[in-house]
Image (cartoon, coloured by chain):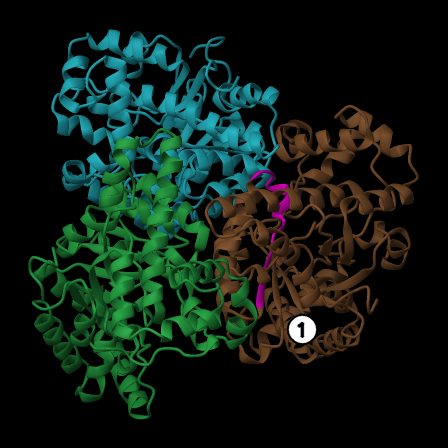
Chain colours: A brown, B green, C cyan
Amino acid sequence: MGAAGVPLFDHHAHSLRRVQPDTPEAFRAHFTESDASEIVRGHLGWSLFYRRALADLGRYFGCPPAEDAILTARARRPFGELTRAMFEDAGIGALLVDPGFRAADHYDLAALRGMLPCPAGELLRLEVLAERLIPESDGWPDLRERFAAEVRAAAGRVRGLKTIIAYRTGLDVRNWDAASLAAAFRQTRDAAARGRTRLASKPLLDTLLWTALDIAAEHRLPVQVHTGFGDRDLDLRLANPLWLRPAFEHPPFRPITFVLLHSYPYVREAAWLAHVYPHVAMDLSLTVPFAAHAATDAIVEALGLAPASKVLLATDAFSIPELFWLAARHAREALDAALSIIERRGFAGPEDREAIARRLLWDNAVAIYGDLAKNAR
Amino acid sequence: MGAAGVPLFDHHAHSLRRVQPDTPEAFRAHFTESDASEIVRGHLGWSLFYRRALADLGRYFGCPPAEDAILTARARRPFGELTRAMFEDAGIGALLVDPGFRAADHYDLAALRGMLPCPAGELLRLEVLAERLIPESDGWPDLRERFAAEVRAAAGRVRGLKTIIAYRTGLDVRNWDAASLAAAFRQTRDAAARGRTRLASKPLLDTLLWTALDIAAEHRLPVQVHTGFGDRDLDLRLANPLWLRPAFEHPPFRPITFVLLHSYPYVREAAWLAHVYPHVAMDLSLTVPFAAHAATDAIVEALGLAPASKVLLATDAFSIPELFWLAARHAREALDAALSIIERRGFAGPEDREAIARRLLWDNAVAIYGDLAKNAR
Amino acid sequence: MGAAGVPLFDHHAHSLRRVQPDTPEAFRAHFTESDASEIVRGHLGWSLFYRRALADLGRYFGCPPAEDAILTARARRPFGELTRAMFEDAGIGALLVDPGFRAADHYDLAALRGMLPCPAGELLRLEVLAERLIPESDGWPDLRERFAAEVRAAAGRVRGLKTIIAYRTGLDVRNWDAASLAAAFRQTRDAAARGRTRLASKPLLDTLLWTALDIAAEHRLPVQVHTGFGDRDLDLRLANPLWLRPAFEHPPFRPITFVLLHSYPYVREAAWLAHVYPHVAMDLSLTVPFAAHAATDAIVEALGLAPASKVLLATDAFSIPELFWLAARHAREALDAALSIIERRGFAGPEDREAIARRLLWDNAVAIYGDLAKNAR
């Protein structure tokens, strides 16, 4: 009967922070995509997701639904034990981690694996790789070659590539000539030498993404693409997945499964892409849990045009185990609420609920990324 | 009480295939906008619309809700009798057909009329006409003249024009100078001579559409415009009906009623256009049935900003009678579900339901296209 | 228990007409954003908002829900008394008025204040100010100086600035060089001299807005920005609040609170902006009441990503007291319906309903504009 007993293959998440938050403000900052202290201090108390989170965590820890009480309760438990317990209670059965997010102060994959009660695979965040290679590269052709070599070398190790180009220069990926690329490389390396290592050069990002996609196609690697909302780094107009049409229509990329991450507010657009392109799937992590009650409507919309075999859920959680626990629970709950709406309208019977839930929570991820348990890497 | 007893004026549909599908895969292909065999084979079983379709058809044919059983049941009945029975059961009281869709292997209008239990009128698909005229035209001015002559000649015969320019070069229609048009004509005719007859030249498509609109205005002919989703031929960004503003603001086009077809996902945008422009109406065919349960929300949204006198429903069905039957039934059901939501929120009383249903299903189409029964052509 | 007893701080509205409508058609024209008589005559009877309005007004006046009866009933009562009674019944506790809308035939602020049972503050409509200054200015630098001086002078008097640049040239505000500005000024003043006083010059509008924002930042004045739908003057593509990103990212503008007005259909986009930017809030006036039953969904969406401390409601009413009365009532009703959906999904408890309602209806406006009662100006 629905999503309750179905494990989650959390195909898109991040690692845990080595130093856990110990003040209300530091804890609270994990519950918004805003980097502004005014939001954290003045507005988060009115975020319906955060209010619900406190209520849920109070129940979990058996304490009042208040920051101080929760911080005290979580600090009482050894972090490894807390993590294991919350992952188990959340029914997370497998995990793919993007270790490129604030790597310096998060556990590396080996350490994380040691803490988790489930297998964990790895994703390769392309832009972080490129940033690492720029200072050591000798011109654009050399950068491209090094980048390609590293992506190829990773192909046997990682479960998928991930691009956050939407955060940098947007999804309107274009072709660039050699002169533009050479000039962009020089500017970017000079900026990196002066300490500005964040790669935001459109010629380089566009062309390296295309390079990575060529390799993904050779190796039949899935590629996760950040689409839709996130933090304010992003121009949301350029995060509309419809911009990716040239990549979807490019015949050499047909062996890739593109997984559109998050998708909100472009859920209907993503669902249409998943409807017409065999190699496009969509995900609603970050929408669950950040859009709170509205995540239910996002799932309803997704299952309108997209087949249930093309829609995925995940936590996109990071840094603290509570986010994993909340997002996994809210995903199942939102999915159940969505299925109730769909059932009321006659487009699913009670006998379909668990099968559909299993597709979104587990089976679709296994079909795309493989079974982590069988072939851990 | 609601839509149940109200006939449908199916103002936008296509003809039936002379050779009907006789394998599960061939049958299934009618239930997706995707042209990919992987979708048809691997994903359609997870389409909530298709699952529902099988259940409904199983009930209709009195057989298990499975492809083989349905194929066997439908093959047992003479095709003409099956068509007539399904149209009658679907309560389709009038039909407008775009005969330009895969004309070679579909019944022509005369044959189709012989099979149907209701009157059927004709739409003129502009791009197919242009494609036919290009090889026989002698330069751009000649093409334009021939095109205008044929549109004018059709004006007395057809109930409306239809454009699928969204599928070719998008709705951002522009002005082009004579030199661009002459060059575009030469390229296009050369391509046609080499067998590439699909017209995708933006200068020609934009200018011929404007020519057709001039004639539609003279003859007060309605013009159906494909907007929103469809198959992957289409760049969905350029299918947003908001691009059509220059046409809506062009005073000579005021005698035209523009009917925005499909509209999804741009339902709110289309509803606003229907709210402010007296000569713009919107339709939700293709959304019903392809968006499954989400069609209900589309109707709710449409009736928010658009008056009920500006919203139409149709089947956009093609090739097999089952699509007509399903789409007509799902349209009434989604409309009833939408009216229940609206009623619960206090914006329609029980006494309004049938009147509103009648506007969307029948009266609005009669107001725009005329009464087929009275003046069959 | 919910919004019922909570007063509305109507932070965005207009004045009342000195000559009230006395024919059905003149009355009806206030219930649509369309300027077309065909809409008013032929379609408004099918607007679900208008049908509901007649029913509500019939109950209020104790007469049949028909235009003639309502016109007779309202004409029987002195206009001042009617206004006062409807505002009191609507629970409007404070009002901010944009006096720049059709000022010639509406009461000025002093006269309006004399009629209202609540305090009323003033907004400064920037584009109307610019239009007034153009004929008397001697070149672009002089216009800019006069404009800045008037905005500065108003800063002590008004509660906020308001821009309708979305109605003129869109929200994609750009930088312009001195030569473009000088040329644009000459053209605009020449047009004004020939009677075309409506300012639609992109260089002037963009640059004057930036000038006004600089002053708003100095004085910490809130700035209301028309976004989303309105009448057909507007290219809805360019009314997407996402275009405003350069202003939100401009550090000197951080002291401004930007209030995105209306927002529909870009509600999810506006909610994301309010989620990530501490100085961005969103409003759903005009959506309530013009989107009828769909306003409920807009509130549900807004409260998904935006904290409840960032979402405002208002009437955007104008000309006739009935619009204020209806919009205030529908706002509370839609909010209650939205909170019921949110509660059903577990993201608000019964104990949260009134607190959330109070934020949207009153507290958020006080936080942004100050308390009108305490410090009337």
Which residue is more in the foreground, C282 or C305?
C305
Q: Is residue A82 above or below residue A215?
A: above
Label 1 resides on the chain identified as A
Q: Is residue B364 above or below residue C221?
A: below
Which residue is more in the foreground, C118 or A143?
C118
Residue drawn at 40 percent across, 22 percent down: C154
Left or right position of A136 against B182: right
Quadrant containing the C terminus of chain B is: bottom left
Name the element at disc 1: helix
Q: Is residue A47 above or below residue C233?
A: above
Q: What is the quadrant of residue B229 in the picture? A: bottom left
Q: Which residue is mark 1?
A: A212
Residue drawn at 23 percent across, 53 percent down: B248
Percent position of residue B147, x then y:
15, 76
B272 within the magenta span = no
Left or right position of A80 against B367: right
Percent position of residue A278, x then y:
54, 71
Residue drawn at 50 percent across, 43 percent down: C268
Percent position of residue B155, x then y:
10, 67
Whether residue C353 is visible to the viewer of this picture, yes or no, is: yes
Amino acid on which the number 1 mark rests in the picture: Ala
Residue span colored magenta: A280-293
Whether residue C132 is visible to the viewer of this picture, yes or no, is: no
